[in-house]
Image: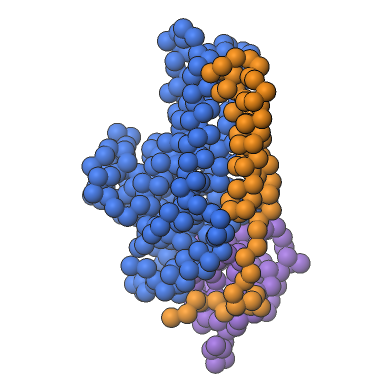
Amino acid sequence: MKVQGGKIYEGERNLSGAVVTVNGARLNPRLDLHRFNRTGFDWTYVGPAPRQLALALLADHLGDDQKALSLSERFMTEVVAHLDNVWRLTSDDIAASLAAIPAET
Amino acid sequence: MAITIRDVGAPAKPRRQRNIASLVGGFVIAFGCFILWVLVASQLTQWPPSLLLWILGAAFAIAVGVWIRVADL
Amino acid sequence: MMSPRQAAFRAAFRDQIAPAYSGLIHVALIYLIGGAALWYAAQQIHAPTWLEWLVVPITVVLANIFEWFLHAQVMHRPRRGFMGIYKRHTLAHHQFFTSEAPFHDTTRDFRIVFFPPYALIAFLTMASVGAFVLSAVWSANAGWFLVCTAAGMYMNYEFFHWCCHVRDDRILRHIPFVNTIRRHHIAHHNTAIMMNLNMNLTYPFADWLFGTSDLRRGLLGHLVNGYDTRFLRRDLPKVRASADAPRAAAPLVAGE
């Protein structure tokens, strides 16, 4: 189901792995941008796999690779580290969370 | 409520497949069981144990290893 | 209460269990192997000194820390070379059991409760290597004590872990240590904390030592806490953006 004017990101842990999709299709991990982790996505903690997920989410949402890379650590600690076992984020959710993250001094 | 993530291409009801871990594990467990059998037998009887005990130990170990694989444990 | 997703996962997982699998044979094998190893090692100990007896409590403590480390850093993290363990635990065991529905239904569910027996073989092999080194630098008795204790701790773990996932607690709730780890481990299955807290599976010693417990108590309090929830930390993490069972709405970012 596609949100009008936005995307739906969903994550789930199951027998196939820790699977993340955007509008039903697998989310590109963007290993070409930076390889934080070689074993896929993960969430609900701080580490290489959640950092890769943060980067992939931001790169897809922002369409700006460098900005995604620079924000990935903060987005990981503020959002990805608190995602539930099964989660759903919309484009609006990500935009709101980026706006709420305190700016770096 | 359905499962959150839609199937991304896998079959609706995946065919049961045995894991490679149960094949390797079968050999490992069989070997471990055989070693333990020989040790316990030698403690209870004598060292080395009799030929019959060696054969029974091998049979037990093989049976355990086969079951591990068949049960896909 | 079980979410529809958890119920669907259980059905899918049970469908994958081989027909030849028997939970009772599985458990019998574990205790046959563990019991044989413990018995044989005990037979090799002769006239131990009190100093050699100290190997037992030291090994208990080290095994407890090893259990904590393995659970926290291997079973709950996708690490190269150890993905099979992560998949079997985080992606299967924790989808089958949640804090809302932590109990198994039949002995076929033992497939997702007990480790495969080669885990015990691997553990005994590691203990044997350590015992060989110990016997070389100290004494044969010390080495055999290590093997005895390792085998005993493994069987302790499997029994305690099963006690956490069995439904009927009319007797278990009154047994010290068992009731403690039952509350501790069922809480660990809360998806908000499962990746970070309550990593011990026998006695919450390492969780207390390394500050990864959901309780704010001393060591003795941790060990005999039982079902008590008065000492839960007030700063336990909460998860957001949940798409499974309904949860209280929480902002995506704290302070939003």
Q: Residue at x 56, y 16 (%)?
A: B45
Chain C: drawing colour: blue
Whether residue C205 is visible, yes or no, is yes
Q: Which chain is orange?
A: B
What is the quadrant of the C terminus of chain A in the image? bottom right
- Snapshot quadrant of residue A43: bottom right
Tell me residue C231's x, y (percent).
Answer: 26, 47
- Snapshot quadrant of residue B38: top right
In the displayed structure image, the side of residue C132 where residue C211 appears, left or right: left
What is the quadrant of the N terminus of chain A in the image? bottom right
Q: How is the image coloured?
A: by chain
Looking at the image, which residue sits at the far bottom? A4
Q: Residue at x 55, y 38 (%)?
A: C120
Q: Residue at x 45, y 22 (%)?
A: C56
Residue A13 sits above or below residue C208 on the image: below
Residue C137 sits above or below residue C158 on the image: above
The mark tally for this picture is 0
Tell me residue C212's x, y (percent).
Answer: 42, 45
Looking at the image, which residue sits at the far front? B52
Tell me residue C176's x, y (percent).
Answer: 27, 37
Tell me residue C253's x, y (percent).
Answer: 45, 69
Q: Residue at x 59, y 28 (%)?
A: B37
In the displayed structure image, the side of residue B50 where residue C52 appears, left or right: left
Closer to the camera in the image, C84 or A95: C84
In the displayed structure image, the side of residue C176 where residue C46 appears, left or right: right
Chain A: drawing colour: purple
Closer to the camera in the image, C214 or C108: C108
Whether residue C130 is visible, yes or no, is no
Closer to the camera in the image, C168 or C25: C25
Closer to the camera in the image, A26 or C158: C158
